[in-house]
Image (cartoon, grey):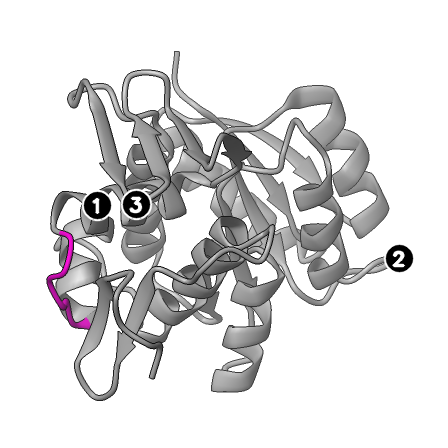
């Protein structure tokens, strides 16, 4: 069965166009036209992906995203924010709030469909890799999709999980933002390099929840590495 996509948008013409194109690709669709309705529809239907407008009646898309991330059923659901706000600061704010991707209106429908497909692929649990990865006090069980640090369970979203997996498979190696984008997001979709920084911050916050040592090293003008023996620059 094709994934269920929720459209949260108050522009009826855009909703109609989105629904048409999604259903043409075989997706199931539910809709909400304001922020409060979005939370209700999400709770009742548990969508696999959410297209979320920033400027909504009743409650902004930013606040909707923030509340979705607090709910167990939607805390890991991929969210693509759709908005006319194209400033870099707005994009960073949207990503920091919990959105997985950010698309500025007007946008290309084929590009949106490609981003939806890529996000849904990345949100699937890792199945092809079996076994356990370990680095310092961090253990990653790939078959159980579970990460612990010093015995403490570490909750990670699907993108942070894949990012940590890649770094743990190459400890000590420095990777640029572009290399991480290709390895974790895939070469078939454009994501701004700044997105890597947002997910690194999320990963650090989850791993260092109990004030443990930061094992992710920032290499100025180069990228990131999993390295417990260096001071973060």
Q: Give x and y (percent) for residue 221.
A: 20, 88
Q: Give x and y (percent) for residue 78.
A: 48, 42
Q: Give x and y (percent) for residue 23.
A: 42, 29
**Residue at screen point 62% across, 62% down:** 97
Q: What residue is disc 1 on?
A: 168
Q: Secondary structure at mark 3?
A: loop
Per the rendered image, the range of residues in magenta is 171-176
- Name the residue nearer the viewer: 221 or 6: 221
Mark 1 vs mark 3, CA separation in Å: 10 Å
Q: Give x and y (percent) for residue 50.
A: 55, 42
Image quarter of residue 32: top right
Decide which of tag 2 and tag 1 comes sooner along the chain: 2
- Name the residue nearer the viewer: 48 or 144: 144
Residue extending furthest top? 1
Mark 2 vs mark 1, CA separation in Å: 43 Å
Say whether residue 74 is left or right of residue 203.
Answer: right
Marks 2 and 1: which is nearer the front? 1
Image quarter of residue 203: bottom left
Residue 191 in view in this figure: yes
Is 200 covered by the magenta stretch? no
Decide which of tag 3 and tag 2 comes sooner along the chain: 2
Q: What residue is disc 3 on?
A: 136
Q: Secondary structure at mark 1?
A: helix
Decide which of tag 1 and tag 3 comes sooner along the chain: 3
**Residue at screen point 58% across, 58% down:** 211
Residue 186 in view in this figure: no
Q: What residue is disc 2 on?
A: 58
Q: Quadrant of the C terminus?
A: bottom left
- Name the residue nearer the viewer: 197 or 67: 197
Mark 3 vs mark 2, CA separation in Å: 47 Å
**Residue at screen point 49% across, 71% down:** 105
Marks 3 and 2: which is nearer the front? 3
């Amino acid at each position: 069965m094709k994934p269920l996509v929720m459209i949260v948008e108050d522009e009826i013409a855009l909703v109609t166009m989105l629904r048409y194109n999604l259903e043409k690709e075989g997706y199931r669709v539910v809709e909400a036209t304001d922020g409060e309705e979005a939370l209700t529809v999400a709770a009742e239907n548990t969508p696999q992906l959410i297209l979320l407008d920033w400027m909504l009646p009743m409650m902004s898309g930013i606040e909707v995203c923030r509340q979705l991330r607090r709910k167990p059923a939607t805390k890991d659901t991929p969210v693509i924010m759709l908005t006319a706000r194209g400033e870099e600061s707005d994009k960073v704010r949207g990503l920091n709030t919990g959105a997985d991707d950010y698309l500025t209106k007007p946008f290309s429908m084929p590009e949106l469909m490609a981003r939806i497909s890529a996000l849904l692929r990345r949100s699937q649990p890792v199945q092809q890799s079996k076994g356990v990865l370990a680095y310092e006090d961090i253990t990653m069980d790939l078959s159980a999709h579970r990460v612990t640090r010093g015995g403490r369970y570490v909750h990670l979203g699907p993108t942070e999980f894949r990012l940590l997996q890649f770094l743990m498979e190459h400890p000590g190696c420095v990777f640029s933002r572009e290399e991480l984008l290709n390895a974790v997001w895939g070469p078939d979709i454009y994501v701004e390099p700044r997105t890597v920084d947002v997910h690194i911050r999320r990963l650090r916050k989850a791993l260092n929840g109990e004030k443990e040592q930061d094992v992710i090293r920032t290499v100025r003008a180069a990228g990131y590495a999993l390295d417990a023996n260096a001071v973060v620059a």
